[in-house]
Structures are given as C-alpha cells and as structure tokens.
Amino acid sequence: MVDITITVNGTGHSLSVPDNTLLSDLLRENLRLTGTHIGCDTSQCGSCTVELNGRAVKSCTVLAAQANNGSITTIEGLGTPNDLHPVQAAFRDNHALQCGFCTPGMIMTAIEMIKDATEPLSADQIRAGLEGNYCRCTGYQNIVKAVLAAQTQLRSV
Amino acid sequence: MTTKTGIGASVLRKEDARFITGTGAYTDDLSLPGQVYCVFVRSPHARAIIKSIDTTDAESSGGVIAIFTGEDLRSDGIGDLPCGWLVKSKDGSDMLAPSHPAIATTHVNYVGDIYAMVIAETIEEAKNAAELVEADFEVLTPVVDVATATTADQIHENVPNNQCYDWELGDSAAADGAFANAVHVTSLDIVNNRLIPNAIEPRAALGNHDAASGSYTLYTTSQNPHLERLILAAFVNVAPEAKLHVISPDVGGGFGSKIFVYAEETAVIWATAKVGRPIKWRAERIESFQADAHGRDHVTRAELALSGDGEFLGLRVKTIANMGAYLSTFASSVPTYLYGTLLSGQYKTPAIHVEVKSVFTNTAPVDAYRGAGRPEATYVVERLVETAARELGVDPAELRRKNFIQPSDFPYATPVALTYDTGDYEASLERALSLAKYSEFAKRRNESEANGRKRGIGFSCYIEACGLAPSQVALSLGAGVGLFESAEVRVDVTGSVTVMTGTHSHGQGHETTFAQVVSDKLGIPFENVTVVHGDTSKSDYGLGTYGSRSLVVGGSAIATATDKVIAKAKKIAAHMLNSTEEQVSFDDGIFKIPDSNESLSFGEVAFSAYVPGDFPIEELEPGLSEKAFYDPANFTYPAGTHICEVEVDPGTGTTEIVSFVAVDDFGTVINPMIVEGQVHGGITQGIGQAMLEHGVYDADGQLLTGSYMDYTMPRADDVPDFIVDTTVTPCTHNPLGAKGCGEAGAIGATAAVMNAITNALDVKELAMPATAETVWRAITGD
C-alpha cells in the first residue's frame, strides 16, 4: 500500500491504496469521479485524460503514486451545467459529442491544446493535437469546430 | 409549426449537459453496495477440445468467491444463446445453428471464447485467480479462411461443410437470360473486409439478485434492453420475464455491436443469484476486439450485364459470408434480407439473382455493424457500376442517370423483394455533382499530375432499407420477433409531458429529437418534454435501436400517441368550451372554436383532465396519457450520392481525401444538426473501412488486430471536413415522413472512396483497406 495526498478539483484527499493502483482507478473507484472514462486501458483512446499539475495526462497509464502531492483537474472540476467552462460550452454549441463517452477526455485535451498554443491554432493543428483521442461517433469535424470556437473565446479574455 | 425548437430546427441537445460535465451514468460508472467483480477466462486457441478444467489453485487464490464453468450453467438449466432470425436455404431447409453456450462446455471455437468465469472481491483478485484456472485442451486445426471453409474440417457436429445456409433471392433464369443478351459484362471479385466495431465504451454488465423477491436487475450496455430481457427470460431461462429488470443507462456508442445478447451479461446475471452479491464486469479493450461481434467479412463474385447503350440488363452475385464460430443474435439476417434485397440499388436492373452461402469459421461471431448488409450491397453495386462506366468509356454520372429509377416509377417493385415508396435519385446526384465541382475535376487532375500526384474521383449512389420493419414481413421471412415500436405520451397535471419509448439512444440524441416532435405537435415548450428510455420497467415492450429505426418507427409511435392525446384533449376542450369536438381546432398549443374569442391552452385542458371538475366525466375517463404501438407499413428507403476525391502520392502510396460530398435524402428532417452529425460519423466509419480498418486472423486463428496499436480506426487527422447536404422526398407511409439517417454515411462512403482511389491509380480492383502500403504496391507492382 502507498499513502497518497492529492488535490482533486480543489479538494484535498489523503488515502492509502495498493501500489499498482492507476490514477484512473483512484479517481473512478476511490473518489467516485466517474466522468473520467476507461476506453482501452492502454493509453490509446484518450477517454481517461485529466489534467495533472497543469499537463493533460492519460490517467490509465499513470500510477496513483506518481500523482502524489499533485494537483488534478477532472471533467467534474471544470464547470457546472449553469456555469460551463468555455470548452464545455463550445462542445455543446457545436454538437461535438454524440454518445458522450470520449467527451471528457476530448475536452481535457482541448483545454491543454488551447492553453499551450502561442498562436491561434489552425484546424489542421487541432486535428493533429487530437491525435491521441479516439471518437467513434462524430467524425471529428464538429470537435474541431468546437475547439476553434472555444479558442477564439479563450484567447479574447 | 416550425419554431426554434420544433420540427426542422437545429436544437442543441438536452443530453449534453450531463455528458460535458462528466455526470453521465454509463454502466461501469454505476456501483451497488457489496458488489464483487468478474473476470472471464478466455480460450487462447481458435479451436480445441476442452478435456478438463482444474480450478483448484484458482479457488484458493485470495479474495475468490466463486468460479463457474459451462457445466455449472448447463446443469442449472441455462440455455444456449439463440439466433433470432431463421433463414431457410434455397432447398427449403432450415439454416443450421450450432449450440452456443454462454460458457463453453466441450469445445472452444475462437480465440476469446469463454470457458470459465471467476468472481472475486476485487478486480485484481479476480484477474489473479483467472491466471490460475488450468484447462487441458486438445488443440485442433482451426478453420479460418472464409472462402474455403466449406471444404475444411467440420467445426460443429451438426453443421456439415461448416455451412449455415445456402440462400438465394431473385430469378436465376431471368438473370441468366439477361447475361445471354448482354453486349458488355463487367465482373468483379470483391472482398468486404472484416471490421471490429469498437464503440469507445467497452461492453459492461452490473447484475443484482434480490433473494426476497426472486427478481433480478441487470444494468448493461444494450441497444435494446427489452430484447435483452426477452431473450434472457424466454430462451436462456435466467428468470421469468416479470422477474427480470433490464436497464440500459447511458451507453457509449453501439454501431450494432450492442444489439446482441452476449455470454458475459448472461453469465453475470445468472451468477448473481449463486453468489448472493451484485457482480460487475467491464470488458478490457482486448476483450472488445476478441469477443464483440465483428462486422462485414464477405467474399463475392459479382457481374453486371449491360446493353450496347449502357442499359443495365442483369446482375448476378455470389457471396460467401462469414458467421464466425457461432450464430450471434441476428447474424443470419445480415447477409440475406439486409443484403440481397438491396442489390437493385437506385437502378432499374430488371433481372437480379443473388446466392449467399454463410459459413462458420473459428473466428469471433460476425453480426450487424453500422449499415449491416447494406454497405456490402452498396459496395457490390457501386463498384460494379463505376467499373462498367470506365470499361465503356462513359461518364460514371451519366451511366447512373441513364439507369436510375425515375420519380414517376414509384412505387417501384425491385426484382429482389422490396418496394421503394419514393425518391428522387437524380436530384441528389445533381446536387452532389455541383457541390463537388465535378465539371472542373479534369482541371484539378491535370494540376495534380503536374505536381507529380495522382488524383481520382469516385461516386456512390447508395440506397438502404431502414425502419426495421413491418412485423408480418419480418416474421414471414424468419424473424423471431415483431419489429413495431412502443410509445407512451404521459401528460402531467401541469401540462408538461413525459415520453416513454422502447427505442434506445446511445449517441443519437433521442431525448432532443423526440422532444422536438412532441413539443411541436402539442405546442408546448421543448423544455417541458422529457424523454425516458432504456428501462424495461418504465417503457412498454419495444425493440430498441438499430437499422436507423428509432425516429422512423419509434418516432412514428410517439407521433401517433401524441395524436391520441390531442384527440382526447379536443373532447375535453369541447366540453369546457360548450362546443363539439368537431368544432374545436387545435393549433400551436391553443384550443379554439370558430367565431369566438374563447380559447384554452393545452395546460388548462391537461389540468382539467386530472382535476376533472369541468370535465365530461360521463363520457371520458379522467387523465391524459396515451400509448401507441406503431408497426411500419413498409421499410423506408433513404438514398443519396456520395462523391469522394482523393490525391495519391505515388512515391509513398499515401492517399489524402481532398474532398468528400454527401447529399442524402432522409425524408423529413427533425433536427438538421443531429442529422449532419450522424452523417459525419457514418462517413468516417465508411472511410475507416476503405482505408484503415481490417480485422485480421492468422492461419492459426490468432487475432492479429487485437488492440488499438494493430487495428487502425480513423483519428482526427485521418479525415477531412465533409460537405453534406440533403434533398427531401418525404416517406409516404409514416406520420413524420422520415426515412432514417444513422447508417447512410457508413453505407455510402466506402464505395465512393474505393472508386476514387481505383480511379486515381487506374486499376480495376484494389483490396480494402487501401492503406499506403496497398496503394504503393498497386502503383509499383511490387
């Protein structure tokens, strides 16, 4: 067992988990934050993407112990239905989701992509930036539209 | 009425609020107090006799609660997983269906076939114990190649030649006559590559048994919870229907793969009573690859007979379809009634004959995957037509125009058993040609060539039969269930409305689309309509979602029930307005009588129905809630034209889709935004089949494409922006005029892409997927 202290969505937690516990399992099972999804267990689908210490990571391939003393933001920590994060709102406004399963990971990836860009991203750059996230429903076109729209809004503030 | 939320409006989706905030509730997100975890032990061999299974070490492993084998289920009276569609061979005999136990007892027949289940306190403990289950297998030579399966070793004792059925449709003598008179014959050998569906949410099940009542609750990733319940109750004998409650909560994509009743949820729900604890199972991705039903996998020889001036005279098709190791729930219907019946396409081909042999192999079961039979049919027809145009030196658009069924021909009875009700194929072709700037293609091709690149353009004028299905037609063709749909429109006391449907949404946005239909018809705010689905205790028995049937059949049931609500409300309004039912008009949520200023809102009438003071209580029951079971009169026939343009780098074989246009006729569209999204997603899966995806087994029956590292699905930078548009000929036989849109993209796109690539390379045939390597080899002859 390993003792872990982490901050998730602004709330501190101290807990003891088996050494091989994945960050995704800690979030989903221990903290019941089930918005972070498991689509492949092997870090290829991106549904489990969360922000760890300011970086988007695939939580299914990060050990919980690696996140010790870290700060995590999950999809639940972004916004509420009445006070959405601009990227969440853009996904809704541009029909960038269908079944919704990949959506939390897509949104977390999009936030980091926009945050990291020094210049406005082109559609092609956004497509390249989404390379690590699978969506089987949308054909990506509306996700790209949503990221472009969110970027415009976030860069203007 | 068209309002900003009514029929025809691109209303933002109700369901999105929970999905974008991470508060959706998918099966694996749910947990029950005291739940334990299940891991399935799967065959590493494609074909083997199970000589013995030793669970001794596994049982003593930490945290283990129980280990079950197939014998435990069988001795407890658990039946085989059934196939729900009985297809007959051309000699009139029934198809041959092998025994399909949820957990194998005597033989394992594909890599991933389950031979034991381990239940433990934690998932880790279950995994550890599963490693300790020892099976003694006698490994047999597997049957893997579909084309030679009928002459290979016999897999199942009751299935000689591994042949499930030998089916035909159409007039073989008429087709032969057409070929005898042909001036030109175009032939193709076609392999429709095996696909692995890969909904991003893996399948999952959470079962519970309540010992006091003897009832079971199953949460599972199903596209049709009522069908799941019916099969588990009536065929598998888990529990009587009344004791089985199936909930299909938020489901993360299906594409057909979650229609079927699988071994895993069957074993889980059965075992809950044995261990007296709730049990959870969630597939790892490798299990999705190994054990979700796969799609397509046909080998076909097809020939088109033409007259001297390019008129289609006849079509002959011979197909071998892979069923995999066992018959999945609807497997038998896919290469027959969803394939052979579509071979007329959009054309007046007078004579068609199709033969389909379906065979068993030691691979995962194959069943419906987005489009199901219709993509395979479209691929055959549209590759043939395009090839014929090239051989005859005619413009492929012109050859199609010449042979299109014309608007004046409807209703049009094809030689393969369908009657198309309406359409205007030239309208969608012309619109697509314009959007694709077809007239300037030659110029673009010259520019590409000047840059050392090869450019090609390809068409696909597809048709599909959707809205499964008129029950009596389906039953007469071997279906085991009727295919109507249920709806209940329950008006609340204050005039808001709850709609129960037997369809299921796993990405399609029914909560929005159906609410638009009801709010539009009742003239009440969109926000006041709530749609409920996915729970057998809430909705009447319904048949779920597949075959683009939800709006067409389920929406029609909702529209019908809503009309019944309006009819009753008019009677109440007539009483309240001291008038007659005939005099009362209802428009935009207001009841009125002629030559009067008096009117009533829908809410006032609803209130009176539940607080029946001013109410015709002697003539009417109080309350305002109506049901409908809608049985479609015919299939619907969405159709359209897809045009794909590609540019190939001959040095590397890399192919870029530079333009993709889709013009579809879905009849009346309720929410254009949602429909466009369905088209985008479908096209992407169609492109995936053409250029990237291929489920491959080696000669030993090992799945070589068992992970996202080996099986390539389209990522964001593999596809372009699509140009999509619609033309409209409303369906003539359902109340909404809708035809369905869920599968069109996947049905039309594949042929358009391959026609474009073969055009660029100037080759007749090219195997899918047309990866860079395949294309490069075709260019270099290497």
Image: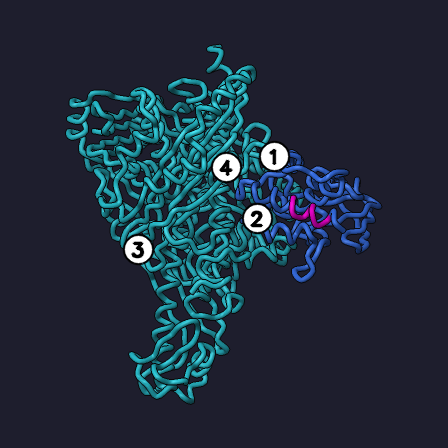
Q: Position of residue B151 (x, y in %)?
A: 32, 21
Q: Position of residue B438 (x, y in %)?
A: 42, 31
The residue segment tinted magenta is A148-154
> Which residue is denoted by mark 4 in the rendering?
B684
> Which residue is denoted by mark 1 in the rendering?
B131
**Dominant secondary structure of the residues highlighted in magenta in the image:** helix
Where disc 3 sits, the SS reads loop
Return the disc, 1 or 4, that comes first in the chain's sequence.
Answer: 1
Residue B632 - label: 3
Q: How far apart are marks 1 and 3 (CA)?
A: 51 Å
Q: Judge whether B270 appears above or below B429 on screen.
A: below
Q: Mark 2 lies on which chain?
A: A
- Can residue B154 be seen in this snapshot? no
B410 or A77: which is nearer to us? Answer: B410
Residue B435 - label: none
Q: What residue type is labelled 3?
A: Pro
Where disc 2 sits, the SS reads loop
Q: Distance between the residues labelled 4 and 3?
A: 30 Å
Q: Judge whether A139 appears above or below B648 on screen.
A: below
Chain B, colour shown: cyan
Answer whether residue B442 is magenta in the image: no
Q: Do labels 1 and 2 share a chain?
A: no
Q: Judge whether B485 appears above or below B495 on screen.
A: above
Classify mark 3: residues with Cα within 10 Å, few (<14), some (14-19) or many (20+): many
Classify mark 2: residues with Cα within 10 Å, few (<14), some (14-19) or many (20+): many
Q: Which chain carries label 4?
A: B
Look at discs 4 and 3 and give the one toward the viewer: 4
- Residue at 50% x, 54% y: name it: B509
Q: Which amino acid does label 2 sit on?
A: Leu
Q: The blue chain is which one?
A: A
Q: Position of residue B401 (x, y in %)?
A: 30, 34
Where disc 4 sits, the SS reads helix
